[in-house]
Image (spheres, rainbow, N blue to C red):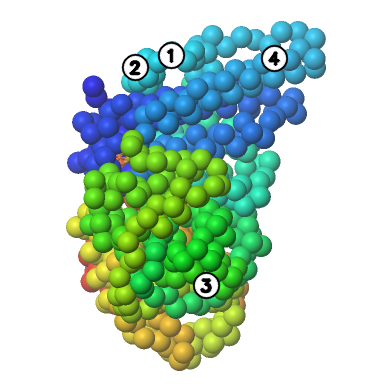
């Protein structure tokens, strides 16, 4: 059985995984994920048409987010779980079809034209084997025969996947928006339209970038409304003697529920990976003192580090990897995450996880150093006067935004080296899991402003953007004219959609790496270089020299 997936930075040979995913995704799961995308396109075709008649259903709108999130890198590896979601996808497609046809009849008095081919006409197979077969027929490459248009369609689809993950977090916090739901349907439907050309998809990609800023804004609002503005906070990175639960992922609401349910039970809750910024929120850290510290580094070190965490572990979003037997029985998944044989918690009752933690031995008393997090835009802008003064007086020469995902490739040492070599009169803003490459190093401060400011999770790119816009406003210039270099590490589709947002804002000269996306055709890449001067990272020395104009 073959497969083809090229959606993340790990794509085999810089082209695509075709035997087995570097991430661990097998051909069966790849086919099921491809079928999910196909089914969602069918659903979206009807949902888009139904919207024209003012007909929609929120549970179906929300399912589109969940379905897309399921196919993001390192989220759901469980064929049975995905098959269940495919059944739901099919049922919802049929429901949207019926709703659309009824609305059409009521409004026009006639019958809606029948769609007899493509994803709208998909009839779900009866068993897992059949689903896999169907998925194999609708792989990535089947989306278009023209390599440039295929490339642009992939840019759109991966943008939707990334945006779906953020919109899902926002929805869980009670934030939703009609424009956002509608764009998912419109864009998914558009990818099936043979009448659409390259520039249609380029335009759609920019629209996704634009709407994604709204989504990240909604998510930011949701976080702030629930947990307050992040404040600079010291986070212990060792463990202390007590029972422990480790939470990995991006979903703060799930963390909050777990904190509520573990209060007073003699359990400390630790963050892992993208959960680290949770410590900066007063509504989490100050309200729940048993939110104790951070354990481990970025996602790709989990197999090495988790055997050393003696308590229970739960993943609420990406990035899960094949678990080792030594900790598989104390590992849980939640939300869209899944791994065969790993217990999945559906809903909001975490007693199984809590009981497991209570059964496990105490974590050792092993204090280490502390790191700082919580420099959201509110905290940074609170010292904006100092920052602006620093720039005007020449004490701060330049800002480096070194943000994005982490990964396993050796080329990622570039980011550590870059951070280390940034001159002492420059400030580094960081966000997302790539920061684990350098956030335990000492950077000192410039006149009381720490030289390394951790803005938060990848979705807090919104916060970084607010900082950049405020600086541009203070200096009465555009973001492109600021003494700011943006150097991104990307891995999965969330970083991809953030890049689309930056491009939509007209931000130029961004460097990305370690590798360029495998799904960019040479012509599409040329377009990005010509219009945005988008470039690949080279070496830390050369890129620094260029940034500093030396
Ligand atoms: Fe390969 Fe990345 Fe796709 Fe996994 S998600 S199969 S590593 S391209
Ligand atoms: Fe990281 Fe997976 Fe992208 Fe949220 S957690 S940034 S890779």
Do residues under tags 3 and 4 come within 8 Å of each other at their CB atoms? no
Do residues under tags 2 and 1 come within 8 Å of each other at their CB atoms? yes
- Report the mark closest to the observer, 1 or 4: 1
* Alpha-carbon span between mark 3 and mark 4: 54 Å
- Say which residue label 3 marks: 289
- Say which residue label 4 marks: 101
For label 3, being within 8 Å of ligand 2 is answered: no
Q: Is residue 367 left or right of residue 541?
A: right
Q: Is residue 548 above or below residue 17?
A: below
- Report the mark closest to the observer, 3 or 2: 3
Q: Is residue 343 visible?
A: yes
- Say which residue label 1 marks: 125
Disc sitting over residue 408 in the figure: none
* Alpha-carbon span between mark 4 and mark 2: 32 Å
**Residue 543, image x, y percentages:** 28, 67
Answer with mark 3 or mark 2, whichever residue precedes in sequence. Answer: 2
**Residue 324, image x, y percentages:** 24, 47
Q: Is residue 8 above or below residue 450?
A: above
Q: Quadrant of ligand 1?
A: top left
Q: How many marks can you see?
A: 4
């Amino acid at each position: 059985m073959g497969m083809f997936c090229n959606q993340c930075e790990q794509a085999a040979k810089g082209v695509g995984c075709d035997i087995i995913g570097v991430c661990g995704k097998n051909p069966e799961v790849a086919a099921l994920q491809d079928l999910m995308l196909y089914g969602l396109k069918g659903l979206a075709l009807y949902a888009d048409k139904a919207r024209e008649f003012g007909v929609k259903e929120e549970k179906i709108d929300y399912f589109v987010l969940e379905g897309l999130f399921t196919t993001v890198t390192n989220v759901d590896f469980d064929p049975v779980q995905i098959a269940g979601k495919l059944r739901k996808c099919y049922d919802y497609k049929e429901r949207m079809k019926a709703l659309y046809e009824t609305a059409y009849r009521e409004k026009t008095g006639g019958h809606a034209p029948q769609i007899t081919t493509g994803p709208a006409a998909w009839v779900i197979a009866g068993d897992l084997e059949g689903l896999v077969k169907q998925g194999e027929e609708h792989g990535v490459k089947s989306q278009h025969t023209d390599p440039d248009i295929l490339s642009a369609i992939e840019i759109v689809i991966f943008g939707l996947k990334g945006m779906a993950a953020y919109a899902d977090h926002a929805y869980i916090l009670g934030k939703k928006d009609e424009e956002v739901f509608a764009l998912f349907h419109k864009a998914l439907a558009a990818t099936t339209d043979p009448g659409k050309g390259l520039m249609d998809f380029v335009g759609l990609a920019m629209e996704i970038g634009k709407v994604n800023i709204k989504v990240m804004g909604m998510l930011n609002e949701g976080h702030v409304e629930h947990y307050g503005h992040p404040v600079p906070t010291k986070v212990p990175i060792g463990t202390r003697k007590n029972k422990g639960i480790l939470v990995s992922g991006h979903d703060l609401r799930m963390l909050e529920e777990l904190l509520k349910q573990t209060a007073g039970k003699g359990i400390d809750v630790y963050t892992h990976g993208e959960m680290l910024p949770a410590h900066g929120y007063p509504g989490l850290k100050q309200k729940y003192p048993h939110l104790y510290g951070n354990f481990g580094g970025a996602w790709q070190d989990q197999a090495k580090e988790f055997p050393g965490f003696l308590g229970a572990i739960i993943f609420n979003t990406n990035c899960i990897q094949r678990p080792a037997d030594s900790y598989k029985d104390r590992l849980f998944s939640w939300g869209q995450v899944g791994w065969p044989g790993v217990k999945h918690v559906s809903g909001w009752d975490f007693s199984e996880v809590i009981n497991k933690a209570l059964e496990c031995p105490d974590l050792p008393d092993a204090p280490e150093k502390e790191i700082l997090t919580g420099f959201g835009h509110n905290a940074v802008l609170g010292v904006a006067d100092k920052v602006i003064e620093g720039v005007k007086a020449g004490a701060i020469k330049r800002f480096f935004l070194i943000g994005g995902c982490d990964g396993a490739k050796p080329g990622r040492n570039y980011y550590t080296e870059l951070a280390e070599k940034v001159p002492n009169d420059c400030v580094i803003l960081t966000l997302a899991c790539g920061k684990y490459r350098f956030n335990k190093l000492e950077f000192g401060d410039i006149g009381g402003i720490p030289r390394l400011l951790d803005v938060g999770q990848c979705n807090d790119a919104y916060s970084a953007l607010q900082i950049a816009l405020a600086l541009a406003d203070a200096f009465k210039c555009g973001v492109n004219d600021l003494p700011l270099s943006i150097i991104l590490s990307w891995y999965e589709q969330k970083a991809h959609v953030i890049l689309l947002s930056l491009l939509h804002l007209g931000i130029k000269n961004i460097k990305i790496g370690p590798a360029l996306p495998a799904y960019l055709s040479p012509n599409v890449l040329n377009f990005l270089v010509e219009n945005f001067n988008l470039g690949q990272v080279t070496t830390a020395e050369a890129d620094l020299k260029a940034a500093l104009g030396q």
